[in-house]
């Protein structure tokens, strides 16, 4: 412990507590910056690539966490993505600064950062469109130069869409394919896609079946509005809703109500993965001059941290066989807090059986399904604090432990919630303890009687010996 504290103090002296490089970073500079952060904080960072762009540039991601690269049970994965549109660069820079800031705070033993890294796997992709960035120009606030990728495709129209099939979203670009594969690799829970050109937090859905500018709420509209306001109210101007010539009450908007986007990434996250993603417009100017970057960072710094914290809300737990093996792809449905109907949006357990369900405070009903079997837990209370933990276990007697599909096909074994059995388990343990104590008391009582009789018999046989001992004891008393 002392050695760790000394090391952190030494690193803070060596590197300083504020090393953020407030300037624009081209792709070469960005890689150098990421490498420098990793060199400064190797124990909490991992730099990896999810693939290459159309022009063969790396799509870098930095994970920053305690034990990076290791999947820990009930530790949620969070992500930020920047620079999807190559000319919208503020997100790219803010994410680099955020990584640097987390590293510096860790080196100075900041308690909040230490706890954040202990409980969260944070993945940050500064640039999803490095090719487009190279075409964009500093000071260009409004043009579309560099917006698309090298094939002139808008990546935020390039994902599969629930309502509209277009030439763009039916033919995914390499950047889109790499992101889709990345989303399958990590069970992300919460995410934000950082854009520029306005100042607002935009949430699903991004379009509707009529392609009209009207509200298109998702089944989790309450959650999306809440997490969007988490960001907007931590920004000194966004929550006011009057920026960049637009009017957004409380600094948030439903995507389709603003304008329709078919093939957007945030809807894809919500519909095809477990991730709740919003799109955050960070700044009126898409490519501001570098002398504005520090003030923009200071405006967004608290909001960026506050949004990450929202990955820890609702419920979480593990779904597993009775031998402890996690069950992947179990389906988790919720109803409530103000409706008896299950929401038309389920999430699924990850490869190790973990699940994370973002929920607002209130009372819910939770249903977990494994194949054609399900369990309803009717009394799930969510507070305004850390996630409540609900683990579910499938009794798998007589079923091969390693073949999950056989459980789904052959036998309807009972499933139970550990929390619902907790009271019964405690009562059983208490009863067992009472029985054991009672039996022990009886044995001790009987043993004392036997011992008394044996001592009495010995005294009658060797009375002189005992009298001698008693005489010696009395003689020692002054």
Image (cartoon, rainbow, N blue to C red):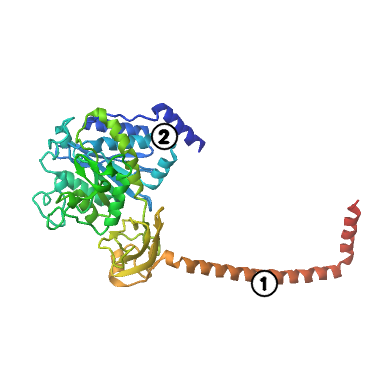
Q: Find residue 236 and report its horizontal and vertical position in percent.
A: 31, 39
Badge 1 marks a residue whose secondary structure is: helix
Badge 2 marks a residue whose secondary structure is: helix
Q: CA distance from mark 2 to mark 1?
A: 60 Å
Residue 31 marker = none
Q: Find residue 220 and report its horizontal and vertical position in percent.
A: 27, 57
Residue 442 marker = 1
The quarter of the displayed image where residue 373 is located? bottom left
Q: Residue at x 17, y 36 (%)?
A: 87
| Above/below status of 18 relative to 250 | above
Q: Is residue 465 left or right of residue 317?
A: right
The quarter of the displayed image where residue 440 is located? bottom right
Foreground tag (2 vs 1): 2
Q: Residue at x 36, y 53 (%)?
A: 313
| Above/below status of 298 relative to 214 | above
Residue 398, visible in the rendered structure: yes
According to the picture, the residue beneath numbered tag 2 turns out to be 107
Q: Is residue 188 left or right of residue 476?
A: left
Q: How many marks?
A: 2
| Above/below status of 378 relative to 134 | below
Front position in the image: 199 or 400: 199
Front position in the image: 356 or 475: 356
Toward the left, the furthest residue is: 167
Q: Find residue 361 and report its horizontal and vertical position in percent.
A: 37, 57
Few, some or many C-alpha atoms within 10 Å of disc 1 (few <14, some 14-19, many ≥20)?
few
Few, some or many C-alpha atoms within 10 Å of disc 2 (few <14, some 14-19, many ≥20)?
many
């Amino acid at each position: 412990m002392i050695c760790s504290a000394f090391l952190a103090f030494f690193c803070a002296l060596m590197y300083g507590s504020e090393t953020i490089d407030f300037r624009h970073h081209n792709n070469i500079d960005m890689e150098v910056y990421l490498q420098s952060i990793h060199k400064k904080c190797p124990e909490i960072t991992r730099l990896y690539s999810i693939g290459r762009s159309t022009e063969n540039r790396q799509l870098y991601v930095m994970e920053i966490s305690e034990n990076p690269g290791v999947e820990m049970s009930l530790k949620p994965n969070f992500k930020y993505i920047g620079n999807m549109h190559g000319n919208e660069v503020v997100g790219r820079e803010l994410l680099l600064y955020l990584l640097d800031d987390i590293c510096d705070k860790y080196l100075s033993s900041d308690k909040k950062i230490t706890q954040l890294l202990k409980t969260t796997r944070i993945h940050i992709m500064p640039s999803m469109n490095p090719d487009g960035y190279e075409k964009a120009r500093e000071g260009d606030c409004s043009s579309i130069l560099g917006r698309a990728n090298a094939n002139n495709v808008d990546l935020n129209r390039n994902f599969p869409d629930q309502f509209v099939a277009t030439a763009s979203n039916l033919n995914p670009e390499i950047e889109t394919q790499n992101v889709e594969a990345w989303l399958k690799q990590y069970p992300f829970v919460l995410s934000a896609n950082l854009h520029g050109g306005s100042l607002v937090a935009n949430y699903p859905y991004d379009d509707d079946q009529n392609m009209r500018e009207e509200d298109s709420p998702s089944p989790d509209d309450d959650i999306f509005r809440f997490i969007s306001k988490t960001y907007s109210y931590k920004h000194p101007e966004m929550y006011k809703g009057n920026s960049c010539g637009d009017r957004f009450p409380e600094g948030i908007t439903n995507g389709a109500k603003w304008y329709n986007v078919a093939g957007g990434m945030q809807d894809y996250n919500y519909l095809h993965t477990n991730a709740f993603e919003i799109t955050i417009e960070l700044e009126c100017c898409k490519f501001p001059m570098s002398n504005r970057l520090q003030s923009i960072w200071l405006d967004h710094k608290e909001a960026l941290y506050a949004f990450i914290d929202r990955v820890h809300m609702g419920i979480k737990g593990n779904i597993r066989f009775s031998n402890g093996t996690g069950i992947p792809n179990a389906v988790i449905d919720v109803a409530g807090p103000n409706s008896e109907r299950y929401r038309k949006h389920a999430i699924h357990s990850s490869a190790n059986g973990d699940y994370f369900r973002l929920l607002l405070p209130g009372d819910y009903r939770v249903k977990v399904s494994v194949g054609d079997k399900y369990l309803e837990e009717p009394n799930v209370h969510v507070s305004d604090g850390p996630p409540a933990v609900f683990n579910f276990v499938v009794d798998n007697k007589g079923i091969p432990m390693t073949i999950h599909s056989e459980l789904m096909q052959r036998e309807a074994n009972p499933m139970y919630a550990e929390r619902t059995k907790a009271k019964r388990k405690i009562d059983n343990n208490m009863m067992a303890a009472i029985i054991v104590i009672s039996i022990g008391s009886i044995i001790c009582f009987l043993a004392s009687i036997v011992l008394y009789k044996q001592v009495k018999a010995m005294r009658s046989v060797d009375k002189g010996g005992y009298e001698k001992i008693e005489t010696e004891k009395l003689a020692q008393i002054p």
